[in-house]
């Protein structure tokens, strides 16, 4: 195989993967015309995308890259701060996975989001090597799980 052919195959494969990911996200969020619900779904997808960056490094699907890892955790920190803001309005949609308990106990929901932000900030300050990925993911996942088990369908 020539280098050019290998390059073209790689570009094609990457494009197919990217399009399948994008179309999957679009189909999950398609038909959501309520801008508040759509914003919440987008924010949660962004958190998941950044958690995936760390997960791929942990599973050694991607090499450890301190800058990418820190950037992902910083994004999670920022998104966690935004979470209560995008859930402020009590808006529902059939595709939404939000439970009404979010608004019934908005204070607890906000506390979990704030804890995620604080935990992410601490992780960012201490994320130095591959060995720091696993404890970081465990810590962040605990906040995600506590919120999802209580406030997500």
Image: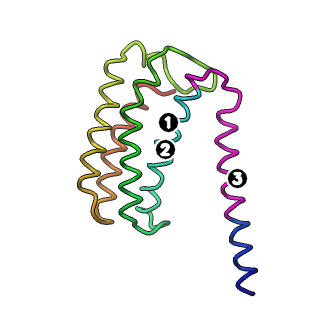
| Pair 2/3: label in front | 3
Secondary structure of the magenta portion, mostly?
A: helix
Name the mark on residue 48.
2
Residue at x 38% of width, y 39% of height: 78
Residue at x 37% of width, y 44% of height: 141
Name the mark on residue 19.
3
Q: CA distance from mark 2 to mark 1?
A: 6 Å
Residue 4, by quadrant, is bottom right
Q: For residue 149: magenta?
A: no
Q: CA distance from mark 2 to mark 3?
A: 18 Å
Residue 116, by quadrant, is top left
Q: Secondary structure at mark 1?
A: helix
Q: For residue 34: magenta?
A: yes
Q: Secondary structure at mark 2?
A: helix
Q: Is residue 17 left or right of residue 49?
A: right
Range of the magenta residues? 14-37
Labelled pair 2, 1 in contact (Cβ < 8 Å) = yes
Residue at x 34% of width, y 37% of height: 143
Q: CA distance from mark 1 to mark 3?
A: 20 Å
Decide: few, some or many residues near mark 3? Use Cα within 10 Å; few <14, some 14-19, many ≥20. Answer: few
Decide: few, some or many residues near mark 2? Use Cα within 10 Å; few <14, some 14-19, many ≥20. Answer: few
Name the mark on residue 144.
none
The residue identified by callout 1 is 44
Residue 11 drawn above or below residue 102: below
**Tell me, what colour scheme is on the image?**
rainbow
Residue 19 drawn above or below residue 151: below
Q: How many numbered marks appear?
A: 3
Instruction: Specify which label sits upstream in the sequence, 1 or 3.
Output: 3
């Amino acid at each position: 195989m020539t280098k050019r052919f290998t390059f073209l195959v790689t570009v094609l494969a990457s494009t197919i993967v990217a399009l399948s990911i994008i179309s999957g996200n679009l189909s999950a969020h398609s038909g959501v015309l309520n801008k508040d619900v759509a914003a919440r779904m987008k924010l949660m997808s962004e958190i998941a995308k950044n958690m995936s960056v760390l997960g791929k490094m942990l599973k050694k699907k991607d090499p450890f890259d301190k800058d990418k890892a820190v950037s992902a955790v910083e994004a999670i920190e920022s998104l966690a701060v935004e979470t209560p803001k995008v859930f402020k309005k009590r808006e529902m949609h059939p595709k939404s996975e939000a439970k009404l308990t979010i608004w019934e106990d908005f204070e607890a929901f906000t506390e979990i989001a704030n804890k995620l932000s604080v935990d992410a900030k601490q992780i960012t300050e201490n994320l130095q090597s591959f060995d720091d990925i696993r404890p970081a993911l465990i810590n962040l996942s605990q906040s995600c799980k506590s919120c999802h088990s209580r406030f997500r369908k």
